[in-house]
Image (cartoon, rainbow, N blue to C red):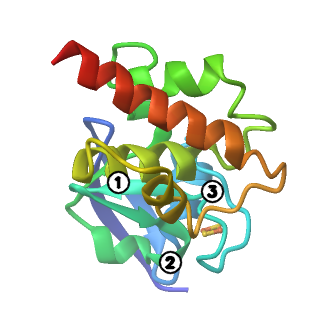
Amino acid sequence: AQRRRIALTVNGRQENVEITDGELLVDVLRRRLRLRGTHAGCYNGDCGACTVRVGETIAKSCLLLAASVDGDAITTLEGFSGTEGLSELQQVLWERDAFQCGFCVAGHVFALDDMLARIPEPAEADVREALIGNLCRCTGYVNLVGAVLEVADRRRKRE
Ligand code: FES
């Protein structure tokens, strides 16, 4: 296969990576950059386990050719909260046992964070809608929803 070099900023670090033309971003992150917080579940856009942020937009990295994000800034789960330890959202998800087996964490964390940025005072239906496209085979949605509503509540009380 044809090879090429791309430049990415991943979690704030410059990375020059040699890839093959058809290589998916999820595989570049996991295999070449060894960032295993991005999981590969379905390779089909269904499960959300491979979710990352490309620039400011969340995206399923199994649906993106790595070559198509040449020059872009990527945030993976490892870089989600910068150097601050767990973000408040991650902390509350943890406290409420919302991670369960953990396979789908990246999708949940990015999708829920994205939703909270758009809808600071979500209703339960907003949270459930944000989780469409993120499959949890442990079916732990009740704790996920409760955690997000708690984060929104904590933020409201601080204002
Ligand atoms: Fe990308 Fe499932 S691996 S959505």
Identity of the residue drawn at 42% across and 50% down: 123
Judging depth in this view, the residue of 63 and 96 nearest the camera is 96
Quadrant where the N terminus sits is bottom right
15 up-or-down from 23: above or below: above
Question: Cβ of disc 3 within 8 Å of ligand 1?
Answer: yes
Report which quarter residue 47 is drawn in: bottom right
Instruction: Rate crowding at label 2 as few (under 14), some (14 to 19) or many (20 or more) other CA atoms within 10 Å.
Output: some
Question: Cβ of disc 2 within 8 Å of ligand 1?
Answer: yes
Q: Which element carries disc 1, helix, strand or loop?
A: strand
| Residue ID for mark 2 | 63
| Dot in front, 3 or 2 | 3
Answer whether labels 3 and 1 touch (C-beta < 8 Å).
Answer: no
Identity of the residue drawn at 73% across and 63% down: 41
Total number of numbered discs in the rendering: 3
- The residue type indicated by label 1 comes to Arg
- The residue type indicated by label 3 comes to Ala
- The residue type indicated by label 2 comes to Leu
Report which quarter residue 65 is drawn in: bottom left
6 up-or-down from 78: above or below: below
Task: Return the disc, 3 or 2, that comes first in the chain's sequence.
Answer: 3
| Residue ID for mark 1 | 53
Query: Is residue 57 toward the left or the right of residue 49 in the image?
Result: left
Instruction: Rate crowding at label 1 as few (under 14), some (14 to 19) or many (20 or more) other CA atoms within 10 Å.
Output: many
Task: Return the disc, 1 or 2, that comes first in the chain's sequence.
Answer: 1
Identity of the residue drawn at 33% across and 37% down: 11
Q: CA distance from mark 3 to mark 2?
A: 12 Å
Identity of the residue drawn at 68% across and 33% down: 98
| Residue ID for mark 3 | 49
Q: Which element carries disc 2, helix, strand or loop?
A: helix
Residue 37 shows up from this direction: no
Report x, y in % for residue 42: 73, 72
Query: Is residue 15 toward the left or the right of residue 85 in the image?
Result: left
